[in-house]
Image: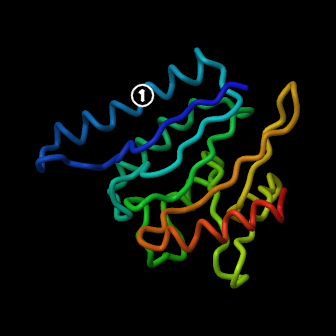
Amino acid sequence: MNLGHIADIHLGHREYGLNQREDDITSTFKPTQQLNTQDDPDAILLPADLFHSCDLRPKVVEAAERGLSVVPDDVPVLGSRGIHDENLTPRDVTWLNYLHRRGYIVLLEADLQSEPEVATFEPHDPDDPSEDAGFYDIDTDTGTVRVFGLQWRGARTDTALGKVAKGIQETA
């Protein structure tokens, strides 16, 4: 199995308040194109902080779409929410939800609310891209690999991990 891993891109970040730094950061997303075409991954993992803020200018979203558009249709990009993508106060729709619904990524998140002691994970449904998923199955030559998602939890991580471990055991 061959996995690509890209994290902490921080599209839209203007380090030191400089437009050039934002452009530099955007250009770091271009190696994704080389990864896709040269390494032939079974999936690309994008675990957190694709964006630097949950409030974005249109050119930042356009850069994300442009970078993700070169990923072949048979290579899923599995993403999860980080601290910069959205804070602990969820919005109805985030830019990651938008990219998920447009088919650029599969947004993976644990449901930490519906059960008091255990996280629940719903499978990705390719026929219903409007719904987020808890896990995604990657078929390989040697079997299926299941990838679970967990969004950023900050100081609540310790509490979430126990629920997630139980949820993975119940789902597997």
Considering the image in quadrants, where does the C terminus appear?
A: bottom right
Q: Give the x, y percent position of residue 113.
A: 65, 81
Residue at screen point 74% across, 70% down = 120
Q: Where on the picture, by quarter, is residue 166?
A: bottom right
42 over 83 or under it: above or below? above
Q: Where on the picture, by quarter, is residue 145?
A: top right
Between 160 and 146, the residue placed more toward the observer is: 160
Q: Say which residue label 1 marks.
A: 30
151 relative position to 166: left or right: left
12 relative position to 47: left or right: left
Q: Give the x, y percent position of residue 80.
A: 56, 55
Question: At label 1, which amino acid type do we have?
Answer: Lys
Say how many tags the image has: 1
1 relative position to 20: left or right: right
Residue at screen point 48% across, 68% down = 153
Q: Mark 1: give few (<14), some (14-19) or many (20+) Cα within 10 Å.
A: some
In this picture the colour scheme is rainbow
Residue reaching furthest to the top: 38
Between 152 and 85, the residue placed more toward the observer is: 152
Between 101 and 87, the residue placed more toward the observer is: 87
Q: Give the x, y percent position of residue 171.
A: 83, 61
Q: Secondary structure at mark 1?
A: loop
Q: Give the x, y percent position of residue 38.
A: 58, 14
Considering the image in quadrants, where does the N terminus appear?
A: top right
17 relative position to 58: left or right: left
